[in-house]
Image (tube, coloured by chain):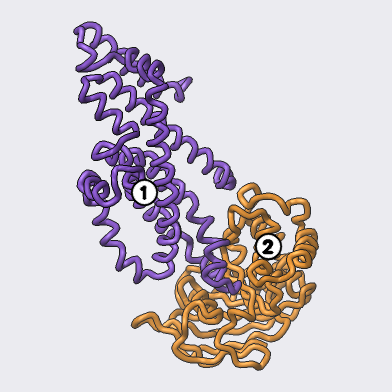
């Protein structure tokens, strides 16, 4: 379980996180949803140690950590593939940097390529592939980190609807097949309802959890499910109350 | 426009034809302004005289390029790694470019003699600045998100330099190198004007003193050919090294 307690982060006079608390169950799929600029990405930056925090504790598997930098895989909105490396070598970057046995890592990456529908494209440069393929490759790279905890910062937001839909099912594989504990940020309520075990609705700055929904239905879910429609309307109403109409 | 690539040649041909016609029409003597056909004739017929001098100048320029690369690349990396070093050195770098090379040339000849060393150093001084500045800017232009990704993968400075910054900066490096090799001959020739026993600059001074203006122009023609050849070679290298650029 990931536990965050009393996290504080300020940028000058602007308080982004003020005694922020969060619990992400192990092997669970937790999604944070909230308006732009409410501090969700800052939370990830603080969790990964990219920016320092003023106060607060981070526990992963009951162990207190300075940050999650070495304990979590992080996937961002952009695929961040290096244009000079082919897809396979991009996916191998975590292993290359960690100085791991590349032959073993290559076998694992190739298996993941086949599993995620990228088989045969290992030697392609990113610029010669579609946005969806690049994001799948970024997903393989994320899996190559070999960390149980995965942080996903709007990983599908730059994709078209069809590609997005196919990648949503791949994200479910992270949990069901690869046994990952996932904390994801999204602006898309539908996406949250389809993927999450738990949806946390965030407030404006300083960010706090204003509503929490546990979704128990089996996955993949259907958005036409009356329970999901009811939750969606409630979440939308809650967010509009909080900040206006920035959420789709 | 059907053949846009032919325009530069057509333009050059027009200028040369006008030049030829003016010289012939006004019967301008060779020791004032020789005709282009005369210059080309001298450049070819006097190749045996010009070639050893051109070889000396080319050697000075090439050695200047290697020396400037040997200094510029490590210095750019050090300045990038330690901005305090950049802050300390930057004023001197700019000052070195604000001083005309003509002012430095006599000093270098006094200190280093009439041999090749002073000319090599002159060429190196001229090439050094564009390479250093471009490479440093190339490193700095690397996207923050990629830096974070490498940080989260646990890459130290040198691994990030090798796998990310260096490749990222390569287009900037080649842009600087192209500028450098284009102007490198200026340094070598000025050095030869001030004091030398060999080289196209030396030959130009000797020919000018004897009113052999056609030979001066022939030397200029060889210098230009040298500059263009080096520029094209760097462009060729750039295409071979930055293979991913055509796809991005």
Dot 1, crowdedness within 10 Å: few (<14), some or many (≥20)?
many
Quadrant of the rendered image containing residue B138: bottom left
- The numbered disc on residue A91 is 2
Q: Nearer the viewer, residue A238 or B224?
A: B224
Residue A144 screen position, x and y as percent: 70, 69
Q: CA distance from mark 2 to mark 1?
A: 41 Å
Dot 2, crowdedness within 10 Å: few (<14), some or many (≥20)?
many
Residue B130 screen position, x and y as percent: 36, 50
With B193 as the anchor, is B235 left or right in this view? right
Q: From the image, state the color of chain B.
A: purple
Q: Nearer the viewer, residue A79 or B173?
A: B173
Quadrant of the rendered image containing residue B17: top left
Q: From the image, state the color of chain A.
A: orange
Asked if residue B155 is positioned above or below residue A123 in the image, the reply reads below
Q: Residue at x 33, y 50 (%)?
A: B125
Provide the secondary structure element on which disc 2 rests. helix
Q: Which residue is mark 1?
A: B124
Residue B6 screen position, x and y as percent: 44, 21
Contact check, label 2 and label 1, Cβ < 8 Å: no
Q: Residue at x 43, y 55 (%)?
A: B135
Q: Residue at x 30, y 68 (%)?
A: B88
Q: Residue at x 41, y 57 (%)?
A: B71
With A215 as the anchor, is B91 left or right in this view? left
- The numbered disc on residue B71 is none
Is disc 2 in the same subunit as disc 1? no
Q: Nearer the viewer, residue B56 or A62?
A: B56
Q: Is residue A242 visible?
A: yes
Asked if residue B151 is positioned above or below residue B230 in the image, the reply reads below
Q: Split into 4 quadrants, where in the image is the N terminus of chain B?
A: top left
């Amino acid at each position: 379980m990931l536990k965050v307690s009393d996290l504080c982060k300020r940028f000058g006079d602007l308080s982004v996180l003020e005694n922020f608390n969060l619990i992400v169950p192990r092997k669970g799929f937790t999604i944070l949803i909230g308006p732009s600029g409410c501090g969700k990405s800052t939370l990830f930056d603080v969790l990964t140690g990219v920016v320092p925090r003023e106060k607060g504790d981070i526990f992963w598997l009951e162990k207190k950590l300075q940050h999650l930098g070495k304990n979590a895989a992080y996937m961002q909105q952009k695929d961040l593939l290096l244009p000079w490396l082919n897809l396979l070598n991009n996916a191998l970057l975590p292993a290359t940097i960690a100085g791991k046995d590349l032959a073993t890592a290559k076998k694992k990456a190739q298996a993941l390529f086949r599993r995620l529908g990228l088989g045969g494209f290992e030697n392609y440069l990113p610029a010669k592939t579609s946005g969806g393929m690049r994001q799948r490759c970024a997903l393989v790279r994320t899996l190559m980190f070999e960390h149980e905890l995965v942080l996903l910062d709007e990983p599908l937001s730059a994709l078209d609807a069809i590609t997005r839909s196919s990648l949503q099912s791949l994200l479910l594989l992270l949990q069901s097949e690869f046994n990952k504990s996932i904390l994801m940020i999204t602006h898309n309520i539908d996406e949250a309802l389809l993927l999450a075990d738990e949806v946390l609705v965030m407030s404006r700055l300083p960010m706090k959890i204003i509503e929490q929904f546990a979704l128990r239905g089996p996955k993949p879910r259907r958005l036409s499910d009356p329970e999901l429609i009811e939750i969606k309307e409630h979440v939308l109403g809650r967010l509009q109350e909080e900040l206006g109409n920035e959420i789709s | 426009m059907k053949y846009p690539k032919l325009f530069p040649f057509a333009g050059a041909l027009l200028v040369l034809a006008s030049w030829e016609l003016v010289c012939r029409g006004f019967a301008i003597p060779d020791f004032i302004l020789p005709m282009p056909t005369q210059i080309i004739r001298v450049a070819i017929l006097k190749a045996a005289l010009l070639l050893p001098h051109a070889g000396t100048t080319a050697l000075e320029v090439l050695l200047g390029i290697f020396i400037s690369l040997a200094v510029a690349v490590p210095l750019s990396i050090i300045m990038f790694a330690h901005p305090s070093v950049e802050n300390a050195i930057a004023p001197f770098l700019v000052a070195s470019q604000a001083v005309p090379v003509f002012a430095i040339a006599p000093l270098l000849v006094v200190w280093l003699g009439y041999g090749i060393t002073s000319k090599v150093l002159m060429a190196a001084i001229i090439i050094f600045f564009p390479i250093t500045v471009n490479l440093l800017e190339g490193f700095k232009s690397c996207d923050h998100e990629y830096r974070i990704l490498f940080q989260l993968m646990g890459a130290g400075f040198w691994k990030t330099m090798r796998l990310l910054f260096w490749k990222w900066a390569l287009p900037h490096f080649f842009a600087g190198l192209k500028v450098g090799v284009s102007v490198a001959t200026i340094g070598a020739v000025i050095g030869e004007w001030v004091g030398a026993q060999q080289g196209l600059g030396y030959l130009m001074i000797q020919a000018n003193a004897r009113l052999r203006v056609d030979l001066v122009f022939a030397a200029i023609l060889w210098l230009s050919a040298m500059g263009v050849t080096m520029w094209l070679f760097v462009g060729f290298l750039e295409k071979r090294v930055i293979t991913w650029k055509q796809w991005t």
